[in-house]
Amino acid sequence: MASRSTTRPLPGQEPLPREFIAQHQRARIIAALAEEICVQGYRAVTVADIVKRAKIARRTFYENFDSKEVCFLAAQEYAMSSALTRVVEAADESEGWPQQVEAGLGAFLRYVEEEPALARSCMVEALAAGAASLKYYEESLQTFVGLFRLGREVSPYKEKLPETLEEAIIGGIFWIVYQRLLLAETGGIYGLLPELVEFALTPYLGVEAARGATAAEEGGGAGGLPLPS
Amino acid sequence: MESPEYPPELARLPPGRHGLPREFVARNQRERLIAGLAEAVAENGYAGTTIAHITRHAAVSRRTFYEHFSSKDECFVSAYETVMTELRKRVGEAFDQEEEWPQAIRAGIAAMLEFLSAEPHLARLSMVEALVAGPVVIERYDAAIQSLVPYFEAGRKGRSAEVLSGLSPSTEEALVGGMVSLISRRIFAERTEELEALLPDLVEFTLTPYLGSAEAAKVARQG
């Protein structure tokens, strides 16, 4: 089973373009690694486990990646850049910082729902998967930090806010999402949106205004979200 | 909190003949093995640590190791539990010494940062290596972090309806998660010396949902 090549077309099918297959194989290997991490933890996963789950030849694995570590780094780059692209796109479509936070967080939660294994491996295990992974994690986090930092411009507290506030907010969001993923409550991830938006906005806007900024969504109101006077 | 016991990972019996009771020796051997594991893991990472490394650091025989633990993993779980028991005890004691909740939170966080920066090997073992040591340890890691939630939930008591309506069922979990993330990322990056400087930021971050920004900042800058 493990030796069957994915490059062989099914009877009656045209052979797929080489590039498409290569892409598909990489994605499949990455997905298999993420699933194995969720089952047994990063350290215990072997290339043999990945190969078995992905149903590919061992040789195919090594044609794509030099090692488990390299494969994990690719998984991380793939997940982080996909998530970030969606977050930025969603935020760009909204006006006003609180609305952008809501749209961006919503896109993030949707992504986690689609890719629970990958998301979980990249949010927590990535910290412990070696120096290169840790560096990449820290860099990606800084991008998210930059997006939240824009909130200081609309905050009455501005520079009085703690220097590490954004890191703490992102850490808190990741933790909640991670906990839900551990309980395999994938379906309910998006439902966390209102409380996570409020959690993220409160330090910048204060309790009352943060609640006002999310109220329109709960009440089904359209577009502009007036802050309470 | 549990009644205090002498921190076992710090108790080390000098090797050699000492004529001590058998039970005491056995207990002490176990503690030495745990300390040995922490040192070996700090040196080689968990994956690179062998039982030979552990027994060398502990100065006990391989046979002694197997009298206490069936595997490296089992020894790790024991070490992890020992560290977390000690950490929980210190946090609990610091918290209990304060009358007012905001000051108690501040004292608890300070005790945690102090312990982790004074014991970089144990900090690394409990925050870094625990994450790669497999699902059994991850479960304990999660439980240990979640066990901090009630300290923050205590802050809901006596708050106005307006403040309470701004808190969601997951507020405390998010605060704890954010706090642990700041701490563990510095341990991962081997910047444990920065930990104690995080105190004001962490206090302000965790108190803001309950006290508002200005009051939280005031408590954070005390001391």
Image (tube, rainbow, N blue to C red):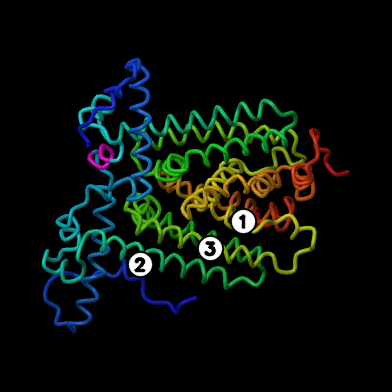
Q: Mark 3 or mark 2, which is nearer the start of the sequence?
A: 2
Quadrant of the rendered image containing residue A147: top right
Q: Label 2 is found on which chain of the structure?
A: B
* A18 part of magenta stretch: no
**Are marks 3 and 1 in one subunit?**
yes
- What's under tag 3, amino acid-wise? Leu
Task: Tally the numbered discs.
Answer: 3
Q: Residue at x 34, y 19 (%)?
A: A13
Quickly name the residue at label 1: B170
Q: Which residue is mark 2?
A: B82
Measure how far apart labels 1 and 2 are at the Cα level. Answer: 28 Å
Instruction: Give the percent coordinates (x, y) of residue B108.
Output: 55, 63
The amino acid type found where label 1 is placed reads Ser
Residue furthest to the front in view is A12
Q: Secondary structure at mark 1?
A: loop
Q: Earlier in the sequence, mark 3 or mark 1?
A: 3
Q: For the residue carrying disc 2, how many other residues have a C-alpha within 10 Å: few (<14), some (14-19), or many (20+)?
A: some
Q: Residue at x 35, y 55 (%)?
A: B135
Tell me the mark number nearer the camera, choosing from 1 and 2. Answer: 1
Indicate which disc residue B148 carries.
3
Q: Quadrant of the C terminus of chain A?
A: top right
Q: Is residue B182 left or right of residue B42?
A: right
- Residue B45 x/y as whole percent: 27, 48
The region drawn magenta spans A48-52
Main SS of residues in magenta: helix
- Label 2, label 3: how far apart the Cα atoms are: 17 Å
Q: Given the image, what chain letter belongs to the residue carrying mark 3?
A: B
